[in-house]
Amino acid sequence: MGPDLTNVYSAPGKGPAYIKAFVQVGTNVMPAFNLSETELDQLVRFFERIDASGKADPKNFKRNLNGTIEYK
């Protein structure tokens, strides 16, 4: 599983600027993406809506051998 971004929009010290930088720079497990400013703005809006849907903690999920994920 990749980094948990469910509530990245409202997390302290995060938000739109963090999301854009994270996507443009990448990490050691995620490549950098060369998106237009319009695409970045759309991605930020997506994360804003996901964030508003509730809280999620990846520690509460179990990855099965067949690749599916279930809530513990």
Image (tube, helix red, strand yellow):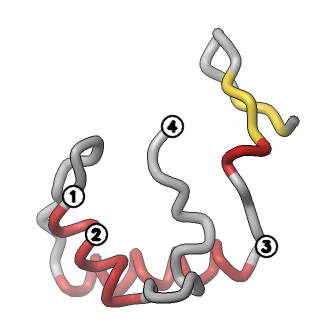
Q: Are marks 3 and 4 in contact (CB under 8 Å)?
A: no
Give the residue at mark 1: 26
Please report the residue visible at 28 percent of the width from the left and 79 percent of the height from the top. Answer: 20
The foreground one among 14 and 23 is: 14
Q: CA distance from mark 1 to mark 4?
A: 15 Å
Is 33 located above or below residue 68 in the figure? below
Q: CA distance from mark 1 to mark 2?
A: 6 Å
Give the residue at mark 4: 1
Q: What type is the residue that disc 3 sits on?
A: Gly
Q: Tell me the crowding category of disc 4: few under 14, some 14 to 19, or many 20 or more residues within 10 angstroms, Cα based.
A: few
The foreground one among 32 and 13 is: 13
Q: CA distance from mark 2 to mark 4?
A: 17 Å
For marks 3 and 2, the one nearer the N-term is 2
Whether residue 28 sits left or right of residue 58 in the image: it is: left
Q: Tell me the crowding category of disc 3: few under 14, some 14 to 19, or many 20 or more residues within 10 angstroms, Cα based.
A: few
Q: CA distance from mark 3 to mark 1?
A: 25 Å
Give the residue at mark 3: 54
Instruction: Label 1, secondary structure: give it.
Output: loop
Whether residue 60 sits left or right of residue 12 in the image: it is: right
Q: Position of residue 5 (x, y in %)?
A: 52, 63
Instruction: Label 3, secondary structure: give it.
Output: loop
For marks 3 and 1, the one nearer the N-term is 1
Q: Quadrant of residue 55?
A: bottom right
Q: Quadrant of residue 13?
A: bottom left
Is 38 located above or below residue 72 in the figure? below
Instruction: Label 4, secondary structure: give it.
Output: loop
Q: CA distance from mark 3 to mark 4?
A: 19 Å
Whether residue 53 sits left or right of residue 29 in the image: it is: right
Q: Position of residue 64 (x, y in %)?
A: 70, 17
Q: Which mark is residue 22?
A: 2
